Image: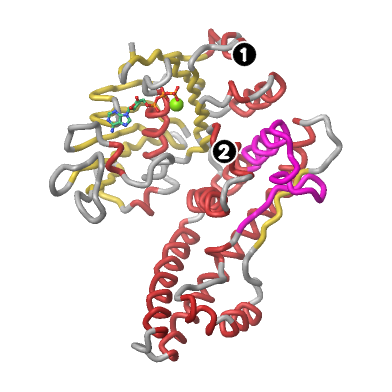
């Protein structure tokens, strides 16, 4: 997959910018705060229409403006399609500091001029992002790891994404009901139908997650061995919060019912899943050095790439946000190896030794205050 051009209007600190991409390796150089990550965020948004930095779309619209428009020309298996995202401030145009429930941003997505829902956009254009924050994934709260996992799965399996959204809806509904039962406003038996749905969807989510970890097993181990001089084996251990066996799942939901009612929320299920990084049997989050964490994350990214390519039969576009400076020479070389044969966007504040050696093979754009100069 390739993105041939990108147009930005009122996106973050860009007023109006069109960029044509002619090489496979594209580098954005600029000082801190110039707008490099904003460009990667825009490219990412055309593949997964939500920011990887902020929860609300408000922040993506240029301050003081009422709308933002992004468009990209995507080349996928010899065909070209135009993907467009249009964001418009609603209500009182308080786009920058939205108050809850006010000034909702209207989002319109189009592929080749036909409106699509966010969920239908997934898979149209596939990106893999690597940022310095990813290195913190090992020690981050479980929610971040779940988000990461769901992002991979949603880009590769629409059914999973539908099930995940339905699961979240059922969960919210069940939690509401638990509160209502706690207050004696609703009878406990009204949970039956929601429990059934929760189990059905929950099982399918866990099974898919198990599949990915099975796939990752070999890849992360081999990649880690290449990256590190240690003899230890890296593995990612999936920790589902509930047993994927239907009967055991049902039994847990039933036995936890009274506790859930007391607490007013559902305590077990894939919404509480997690996974850990292990070096042999040691948890990297507890014992890993910074360098080991970096290697582990890089190994995981490699596994992510192979998984996506195996499932979709496409080469995703790589977005590397300022990660070279985080890595030593050996890991920089490994990362550069990943860019081969894949369109890659790199941001950096300065062209280091490695990137300079590629001078004739890449396209470099200098960014200053939200403009390509
Ligand atoms: N909605 C917005 N409207 C206008 N400017 C914005 C908006 N959101 C962010 N900015 C500005 O965009 C600028 C650039 O952000 P960006 O994160 O892309 O910088 P960067 O080049 O990646 O910097 P660094 O090297 O520090 O990572 C920031 O100065 C920020 O204030
Ligand atoms: Mg940045």
Residue 65, image x, y percentages: 18, 33
For marks 2 and 1 on the same chain, the one whose residue lies earlier in the sequence? 2
Which region is colored magenta?
274-303
Q: Secondary structure at mark 1?
A: helix
**In the rendered view, would you say 11 is above or below 151?**
above
**In the rendered view, would you say 352 is above or below 144?**
above
Answer whether labels 2 and 1 touch (C-beta < 8 Å).
no
Residue 41, image x, y percentages: 40, 34
Q: Where on the picture, by quarter, is residue 310?
A: top right
Q: Secondary structure at mark 2?
A: helix
Residue 98, image x, y percentages: 24, 46
Q: Residue at x 61, y 25 (%)?
A: 326
Q: CA distance from mark 2 to mark 1?
A: 22 Å
Q: Is residue 16 magenta?
A: no
Ligand 1 rendered quadrant:
top left
Q: Where on the picture, by quarter, is residue 353?
A: top right
Left or right of residue 327, residue 129 in this image: left
- Disc 2 target residue: 134
**In the rendered view, would you say 30 is above or below 282?**
above
Q: Residue at x 63, y 54 (%)?
A: 212
- Any mark on residue 354, and which? 1
């Amino acid at each position: 997959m390739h993105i041939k051009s990108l147009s930005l209007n009122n996106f973050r600190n860009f007023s109006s910018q069109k960029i044509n991409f002619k090489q496979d390796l594209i580098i954005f150089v600029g000082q801190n705060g110039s707008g490099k990550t904003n460009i990667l965020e825009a490219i990412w948004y055309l593949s997964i229409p939500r920011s990887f930095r902020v929860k609300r779309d408000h922040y993506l619209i240029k301050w003081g403006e009422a709308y933002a428009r992004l468009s990209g020309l995507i080349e996928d298996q010899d065909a070209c399609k135009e993907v467009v995202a249009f964001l418009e401030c609603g209500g009182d145009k308080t786009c920058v500091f939205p108050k809850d429930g006010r000034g909702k941003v209207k989002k319109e997505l189009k592929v080749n001029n036909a409106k699509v829902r966010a969920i239908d956009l997934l898979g149209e254009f596939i990106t893999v992002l690597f940022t310095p924050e990813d290195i913190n994934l090992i020690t981050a709260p479980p929610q971040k790891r779940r988000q990461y996992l769901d992002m991979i799965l949603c880009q590769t399996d629409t059914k999973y994404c539908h099930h995940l959204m339905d699961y979240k809806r059922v969960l919210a509904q069940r939690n509401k009901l638990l509160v209502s039962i706690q207050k004696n406003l609703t009878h406990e038996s009204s949970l039956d139908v929601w429990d059934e749905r929760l189990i059905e969807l929950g099982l399918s989510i866990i099974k898919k997650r198990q599949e990915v970890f099975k796939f990752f097993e070999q890849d992360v181990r081999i990649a880690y061995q290449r990256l590190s001089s240690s003899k230890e084996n890296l593995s990612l251990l999936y920790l589902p919060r509930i047993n994927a066996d239907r009967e055991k799942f049902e039994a847990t939901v039933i036995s936890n019912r009274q506790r859930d009612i007391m607490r007013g929320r559902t305590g077990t299920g894939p919404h509480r899943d997690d996974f850990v990084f292990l070096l042999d049997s040691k948890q990297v989050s507890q014992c890993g050095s910074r360098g080991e964490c970096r290697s582990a994350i890089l190994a995981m990214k490699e596994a992510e790439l192979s998984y996506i390519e195996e499932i979709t039969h496409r080469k995703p576009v790589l977005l590397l946000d300022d990660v070279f400076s985080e890595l030593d020479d050996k890991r920089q070389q490994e990362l550069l190896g990943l860019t081969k044969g894949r369109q890659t966007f790199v941001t950096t504040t300065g062209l280091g030794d490695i990137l300079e050696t590629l001078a004739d093979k890449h396209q470099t754009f200098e960014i200053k205050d939200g403009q390509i100069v």
